[in-house]
Amino acid sequence: MSMLEIKKKYSALVGQILEEAYVGLRETGEFPAETENYLKGFLDAGLHVDLVTKEELQSLIDETNVRMFGVTQDKRKQLFENLRTSYDDYLDVPTYFRQGRKPSGGQVPPCPE
């Protein structure tokens, strides 16, 4: 087996492991701990034997993120950071405004500013 074939197989396995982990992340809201440790070891092994570079691994991670979430890892982190900073403001808005509903009785109080 040539190095190119080994690299392709390794890259496919990294993508598969990431996809499985991202499914767990979607379902539970947390990256599965045992998968995280396995993945770190697998990525480190690829780097240690000079099979891939950090840039190639980051590219694989970004490709998988785009495939699974529609955005890169950095963009996802930025989106979550924006959510965290606006969370307090978000909770100041009544639920019926956030969910697009009118309260029973038909009267909608003014939105807080």
Image (cartoon, rainbow, N blue to C red):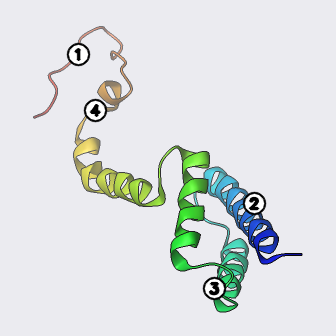
What amino acid is labelled 4 in the image? Pro
Give the secondary structure at mark 3. Answer: helix
Percent across and percent down for residue 105 are 31, 9
Q: Residue 46, located in which quarter of the rendered image?
A: bottom right
What residue is at 80 percent from the left and 74 percent from the top?
Answer: 6
Mark 1–mark 4 Cα distance, whole angstroms, equals 10 Å
Looking at the rendered structure, the kind of residue marked 1 is Val
Q: Are marks 2 and 1 in contact (CB under 8 Å)?
A: no
Q: Earlier in the sequence, mark 4 or mark 3?
A: 3
- Contact between marks 3 and 2 (CB within 8 A): the answer is no
x and y percent of residue 96 in the render?
Answer: 34, 25
Q: CA distance from mark 4 to mark 3?
A: 50 Å
Q: Mark 3 or mark 1, which has the lower sequence index?
A: 3
Which residue is at the front of the view, 7 or 108? 7
Three-letter residue code for mark 2: Gln
Q: Secondary structure at mark 1?
A: loop
Q: Nearer the viewer, mark 3 or mark 2?
A: 3
Q: Decide which of 75, 28 is in the foreground and name it.
A: 75
The disc labelled 3 sits on which kind of residue? Leu
Residue 108 badge: 1
Dot 4, how many residues are within 10 Å of its Cα: few (below 14), some (14-19), or many (20+)?
Answer: few
Rendered view: 70 above or below 13 = above
Residue at the (66%, 74%) spot, across then down: 36
Q: Residue furthest left?
A: 113
Residue density around tag 1, few if under 14, some if 14–19, many if 20 or more, within 10 Å = few
Q: Which residue is mark 3?
A: 47
The one nearer the camera, 4 or 13, is: 4
User: Label for residue 16?
Assistant: 2
